[in-house]
Amino acid sequence: MADDLGDDWWVKDVVKDTDNQSGEKVNVKTKKSNKVKKESTKKKSKKRKLKEIQNEEKPDDNKDENQPEKKKKKKKKKKKVAVENKQKEPPSLELLWTFFQTELEKTLSEIEIEDLKPKDSDNWYLQADETDHAEINNLSPYLKHVIPNLKTDIEKVGSRPGSPSILVITSSAVRAVNLLRASAVFTGKTDCKTIKLFAKHLKIDDQIEKLKKPVHFAIGTPNRILKLIESGALNTRSLKHIIIDWSWEDQKKRTITTMPDVKEDLLKLFQNYFLTRCKKKKCAIGCF
């Protein structure tokens, strides 16, 4: 029976390709495997596409089918509201004493504060017109208004060393220099001798030497003025007018009454030296 099958009976995977005219033999096994691979890749791609379509069409369980889709709200840009520049209240006796009282209450009793407070009838505050405060750097018109008799004050001081008649207190050295220039019209052609009393670029020993000569008009910062009074170089017995640079603000919008260190020294000056003179009607205070 084996003879009937021929010599190639055991080769099961090799057959003659009827489509092949040349009569060449083809490996059917490889042909089938290629077809299977192609079909499997096609099936996989179809499955992927079906999954994608199903995911797209799959409804969200949390959403109500009848409920319409909510549109995303656009964030509204906040409109910039133009802040109106409020006009500051001009300096006054009420504002000045409110500052003193608020600060003194931290260390003193009501009775002690009342002992320091000058009476309103003593005219210890130099009242000025509102027009005098129109320009913050124009000191001369203000001084002319509140101190009309500069020559008389200079004559009273005479040759007394280190005892000015007018003292201007400001918050910084740069501001003191600017105010001294601005007061040039006020001092005019009189024999008014001026002095700068601040720490920047000026040694306290040099200032003590200068105060050994007659001085009529002094301008400086609270800390240096306080030190010079405590050392005895700056005398207050001829002092008639004290001007506080009340309204001026620095770059941080701070005034002489809101700068922590400056404010403390200013309070010490008035508590220890100036308020008692005002109460005795020897001195008057003005706010520029």
Image (spheres, rainbow, N blue to C red):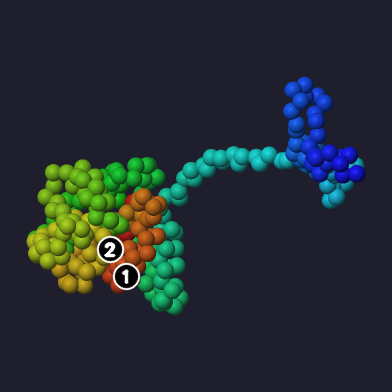
Residue 108 left/right relative to 230: right
What amino acid is at disc 1? Lys
Question: Is 28 above or below relative to 186?
Answer: above
Residue marked by disc 1: 268
The tag on residue 222 is: 2
Residue 281 image offset from top left, x and y in percent: 30, 65
Residue lying furthest front: 3
The residue at the point 39 percent across, 74 percent down is 115
Decide which of 189, 233 is in the foreground and name it: 233
Residue 25 image offset from top left, x and y in percent: 75, 31
For marks 2 and 1, give the CA distance: 9 Å
Residue 62 image offset from top left, x and y in percent: 84, 51
Decide which of 34, 165 is in the foreground and name it: 34
Counting labels gives: 2
Quadrant location, the N terminus? top right
Residue 35 image offset from top left, x and y in percent: 78, 36
Mark sitting earlier along the chain (2/1):
2
The tag on residue 126 is: none
Q: Determine crowd level at label 1: few under 14, some 14-19, many 20+ residues with C-alpha closer than 10 A.
A: some
| Dots 2, 1 in contact, CB < 8 A | yes
Q: Using the rendered view, name the quadrant where residue 20 is placed.
A: top right
Residue 208 left/right relative to 45: left
Decide which of 167, 262 is in the foreground and name it: 262
Q: Secondary structure at mark 2?
A: helix
The residue at the point 16 percent across, 54 percent down is 194
What amino acid is at disc 2? Pro
Q: Secondary structure at mark 1?
A: helix
The residue at the point 83 percent across, 41 percent down is 9
Q: Determine crowd level at label 2: few under 14, some 14-19, many 20+ residues with C-alpha closer than 10 A.
A: many
